[in-house]
Image (cartoon, rainbow, N blue to C red):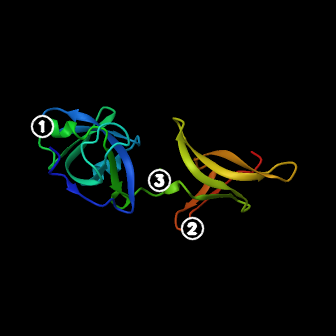
Amino acid sequence: MLSALEPAELPADAIEVGRIADAWGIKGWFKVLPHSASPEALFSSKRWYLQPSERGAKTFTGTVRLTIKEAKDHSDVVVASSHDIPDRSAAEALKGARVFVPRSSFPTPDKDEYYWVDLIGLNVVNREGVALGVVKELLSTGPQTVLVLAGTQLDDAGVSRDIERMIPFVSAFVDGVDLSTRRITVDWQPDY
């Protein structure tokens, strides 16, 4: 059923962008649950790389490449079709598969826009050059995004302890992002 899928090596810059939820319709289309509210990477790339789900039935092994014919928004999911998936049965066999797209095929963000994946791991310092931590994740709180930092701080006894900081990712607090030096400068103090 999935024998038409071409075994492939996962690109070094591959980012997991979603999972296949189920078949959609009878002509081989399938639903994808994107990991992002803005799934532009799914629309910009014509080659997706699939890996089986960690759990559940596996209808294929390793990594396979899927050539995408069309992908579009449909309610809160993305629906897609592929030259390699001829019918509903083949689409159903993809259920649960993890979808990866090479970072190099993401659309270029506008000035002062960043993909979350590019911010994770950046060092955060304040205007005085004090290291506040490293971005470990981002949270969407509705009206804004929040940087979640992992760092250390000396307690009153002079012992270093692990801490977590949260800084709103808004221009009022973020002075600049420099991806080339992997650094974010913020107007934030260590005791906030």
Q: In this view, does 128 lie to the left or right of 107?
A: right
User: Callout 2: few (<14), some (14-19), or many (20+) C-alpha neighbours within 10 Å?
Assistant: few
Task: Please give the residue where the numbered disc 1 appears in the rendered image.
Answer: 27
Instruction: Identify the mark at residue 137; answer none if there is no mark.
Output: none
The answer to whether one can see residue 114 in this image is no
Q: Earlier in the sequence, mark 3 or mark 2?
A: 3
Q: In this view, does 186 lie to the left or right of 106?
A: right
**Furthest residue in direction right, as rendered:** 157
Q: Looking at the image, is mark 1 or mark 2 nearer the viewer?
A: 1
Query: Which residue is drawn at the image coordinates 82% and 52% (left, top)?
Result: 159
The answer for how far apart the CA atoms under marks 1 and 2 are is 48 Å
**Place of residue 183 in the rendered image (x, y in percent of width and height, measured from the top left):** 59, 62
Task: Please give the residue where the numbered disc 3 appears in the rendered image.
Answer: 117
**Place of residue 15 in the rendered image (x, y in percent of width and height, measured from the top left):** 39, 54
The answer for how far apart the CA atoms under marks 3 and 2 are is 16 Å
Secondary-structure class at tag 3: helix
Task: Please give the residue where the numbered disc 2 appears in the rendered image.
Answer: 181
User: Callout 3: few (<14), some (14-19), or many (20+) C-alpha neighbours within 10 Å?
Assistant: few
Check disc 3 and give the amino acid type: Val
In depth, the one of 76 and 81 nearer the eye is 81
Secondary-structure class at tag 2: loop
